[in-house]
Amino acid sequence: MTKITDHIKAANGKPIFSIEVIPPIKGDNLKNLLDNIEPLMEFKPPFIDVTYHREEYIERPLPDGTIQKIVTRKRPGTVGICAAIMHKFGVDPVPHVLCGGFTREETEDFLIDLHYLGIDNALVLRGDPAKPFSTFKPKENGYSYASELVEQVANMNRGVYLHEEDTALAPSDFCIGVAAYPEKHFEALDHDIDFHYLKQKIDKGAHYIVTQMFFDTKKFLDFVARCRQEGITVPIIPGLKPLSTRKQLQILPKLFHLEIPEELRKAVESCENDQQARQVGVEWCIQQCRELTAAGAPVLHFYTMGKADNIMKIARELF
Ligand code: FAD
């Protein structure tokens, strides 16, 4: 399996096409997911990210009037989907590996499973809060920040496992990606502190960065310039999502803490239906991709969110 950073080197300055997929809701068919992304294989993505979704807490009222708290997982299957992608398409999967919901030992076992499967790329993240909570809480003996998890993976790459310091264990060989936010992570007090912690993730051993989606290309370019100023030299991959419904004008800023440029907002507001809005989103994203390509972005990484038709239209124009 090839590391993401080696895929980037091999592309020799030509932007790579890649996507992120979300595991289906429990009970849905894996075949639907694979059928949905199969047409995109025409554009030869060398890697595909697969998100990870931690447990959720639901409350079920019981006949005696009490409430039963149930821990469930709506979208399991990240590792299985990675294996399916690798075998069906011969594409390198990139599982997302979270702090949330894992102890350090469980993380180590998870990474060992990935390594046995021949999966040596990982996007290392803190993870979203477990629903319905709004703040992140680590599991006991788990991590609070992605940088701590980066350190664990980097240690494994040096053959240092959690509890076997005295034994010579085979090192893993993970290529480690981390997340970043051109418009700032919502919890960070300001950009300075956010850059400080991003740099910490790189200093602890991360090899590349993938960003949150953004609709104003300048924000991404300013972010890259600031990273370089701060001494962050690793590849920075822009995450892209074409806006696809009128409702997303409200939803995306709330969910992902980003701004929609006025020009895009007006264009979507003047649409009579979602089909028109979807087309506006596609055209805006194509324009963003052209600007990013001109600026030397190494990869154009698309969040499919379960639908691939609009990504197909964009890829046809660009790849
Ligand atoms: P961190 O890097 O740990 O940062 C979180 C916050 O803490 C930031 O505000 C940072 O400035 C601050 N911080 C960092 N270190 C410290 C420290 N030592 N002390 C004090 N403050 C600190 N979520 C999922 O649940 N599953 C996924 O599959 C998933 N995929 C994603 C993919 C991408 C490309 C992106 C951009 C996000 C993804 N997320 C996913 C969402 C992500 O988990 C959340 O945005 C989460 O809130 C932050 O994750 P992080 O890894 O950036 O955290």
Image: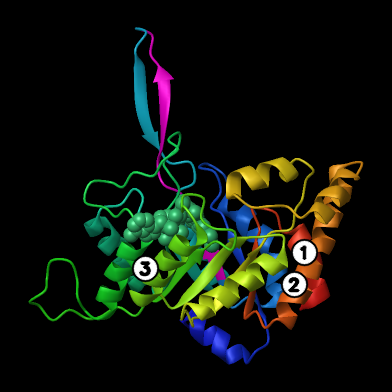
Q: Secondary structure at mark 3?
A: helix
Q: Earlier in the sequence, mark 3 or mark 1?
A: 3
Seen in the image, is 156 located left or right of residue 45? left
Q: Residue at x 26, y 62 (%)?
A: 109
State the image coordinates of residue 173 (x, y, percent, origin top left).
34, 80
On the image, numbered disc 2 is attached to which residue? Answer: 289
Q: Earlier in the sequence, mark 3 or mark 2?
A: 3
Query: Camera-side residue: 157 or 38?
Result: 157
On the image, numbered disc 3 is attached to which residue? Answer: 114
Cα separation, mark 3 vs mark 1, equals 33 Å
The reply to whether the C-beta atoms of the residues labelled 1 and 2 are less than 8 Å apart is yes
Q: Is residue 52 visible?
A: no
Identify the mark at residue 285; answer none if there is no mark.
1
Q: Classify 116 as above or below 33.
A: below
- Span of residues in magenta: 48-63
Q: Secondary structure at mark 2?
A: helix
Q: Nearer the viewer, mark 3 or mark 1?
A: 1
